[in-house]
Image (cartoon, rainbow, N blue to C red):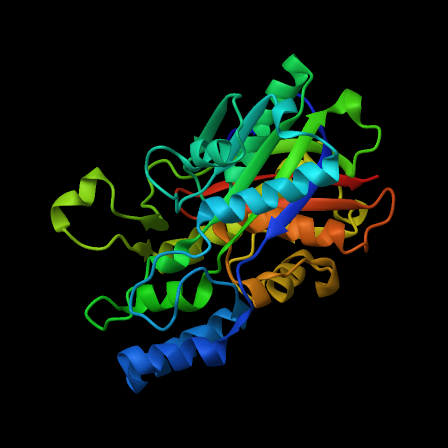
């Protein structure tokens, strides 16, 4: 199993996140579902929510209607997060060498979110988008690492999801998979401004040991969103699909492979004040702590109150952690990203300055 390490470290100049509206509790979420779809459907969703352990989330959709457009849009959320990261970095938009974005719930299929963000920001530089979910951040960092090393200029990465709109409160649409989406997913965005390691003065911290791997060849996707050219003839609303049995079988292995990758570079669990994993459920702190034989307080668990943020998850959690003021100079955070689409794993080491 090959794992790709980026050759160059980066300094984190600025980071910020954006979450839409107020937090929505399970009680309100299920009340709206009951009104639209009946008591039985709401009871099924309640049982799933209890197992998943997510108790709150921020949503861009209107829960008073069966279907909804996102408000704010993914572009509005992305721009809000990007402006915050640029301000924290004391970098102007026109100083960016490249604008990168990643999402699996784009504003439009084409142009990509990156194009819409560039338009809103009057940015005339180059941009690209990765159509990727929970490890989009890791691929983005691989690209940023090379760009920064060669061009010696800052790069911005934006991750955003507004997946809540891919749910129709109609019992003809709803099955167990869709109820999992309804209670599990959250919406949000986050952005980072990165610079070459030589420009570390004044940075929030250092991002190093950027790795990426996958074990998906020959395996059915554990999670996917239809609605592409393969599904046009169905004339149905695009929907997320879960292969829960496959995810259960492969999921924990992705974290193990991420840990092994960092250990191969000489890192040890005891070196890290916090472990920041991808968070698909609200029990991740206790589950991962038990697997690693560490205290649950060392595992970051934002999913309990924010839901699974997909492509935005790692950046949002890191932003919350850094901006909380909890980290001290020299503290290290181990990032363990995992994606069930085709079983990718990726991450990095963050050391606070």
- Residue drawn 35% across and 69% down? 179
User: Can see residue 5?
Assistant: no
Q: Tell me the quarter of the image containing the C terminus.
A: top right
Q: Position of residue 36 (x, y in %)?
A: 29, 78
**Residue at image point 52% right, 49% down:** 77
Outermost left residue: 233
Extreme residue toward the bottom, this view: 39
Q: Image point 45% across, 61% down: which residue?
A: 185
Q: Quadrant of residue 95?
A: top right
Give the side of residue 61 with respect to residue 330, left or right: left
**Residue 88, image x and y in percent?**
73, 40
Which of 202/224 is in front? 202
Q: How many marks?
A: 0
Left or right of residue 225: residue 91:
right
Q: Eyeballing the image, is 318 above or below 346? A: below
Q: Nearer the viewer, residue 243 or 77?
A: 77
Q: Nearer the viewer, residue 228 or 345?
A: 228
In the rendered image, the vertical position of residue 123 relative to residue 337, given as above or below:
above
Q: Position of residue 298 (x, y in %)?
A: 74, 58
Q: Is residue 303 visible?
A: yes
> In the image, is residue 192 above or below residue 324?
above
Instruction: Give the residue drawn at x 58%, y 46%.
Output: 80
Rendering coords of residue 313 (x, y %): 56, 51
């Amino acid at each position: 199993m090959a794992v790709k390490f980026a050759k160059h470290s980066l300094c984190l100049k600025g980071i910020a996140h954006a979450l839409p509206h107020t937090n929505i509790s399970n009680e309100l979420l299920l009340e709206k579902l009951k009104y639209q779809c009946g008591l039985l459907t709401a009871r099924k969703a309640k049982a799933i929510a209890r197992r998943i352990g997510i108790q709150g989330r921020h949503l861009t959709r209107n829960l008073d209607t069966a279907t909804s457009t996102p408000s704010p849009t993914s572009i509005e959320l992305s721009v809000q997060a990007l402006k915050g990261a640029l301000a924290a970095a004391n970098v102007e938009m026109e100083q960016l060498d490249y604008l990168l974005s990643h999402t699996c719930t784009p504003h439009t299929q084409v142009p990509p979110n990156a194009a819409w963000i560039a338009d809103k920001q009057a940015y005339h530089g180059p941009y690209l988008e990765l159509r990727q979910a929970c490890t989009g951040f890791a691929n983005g960092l691989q690209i940023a690492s090379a760009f920064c090393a060669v061009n010696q200029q800052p790069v911005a990465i934006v991750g955003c999801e507004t997946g809540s709109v891919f749910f129709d409160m109609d019992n003809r649409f709803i099955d167990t998979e869709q109820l999992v989406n309804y209670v599990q997913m959250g919406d949000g965005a986050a952005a980072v401004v990165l610079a070459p390691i030589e420009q570390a003065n004044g940075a929030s911290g250092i991002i190093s040991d950027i790795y990426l791997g996958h074990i998906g060849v020959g395996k059915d996707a554990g999670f996917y969103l239809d609605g592409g050219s393969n599904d046009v003839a169905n004339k149905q609303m695009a929907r997320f699909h879960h292969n829960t049995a496959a995810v259960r079988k492969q999921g924990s292995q992705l974290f193990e492979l991420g840990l092994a990758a960092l250990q191969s570079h000489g890192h040890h669990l005891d070196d890290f004040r916090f472990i920041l994993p991808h968070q698909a459920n609200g029990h991740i702190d206790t589950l991962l702590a038990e697997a690693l034989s560490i205290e649950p307080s060392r595992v970051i668990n934002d999913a309990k109150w924010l839901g699974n943020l997909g492509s935005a998850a790692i950046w949002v959690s890191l932003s919350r952690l850094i901006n909380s003021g909890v980290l001290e100079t020299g503290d290290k955070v181990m990032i363990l990203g995992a994606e069930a689409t085709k079983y990718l794993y990726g991450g990095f080491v963050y050391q606070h300055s």
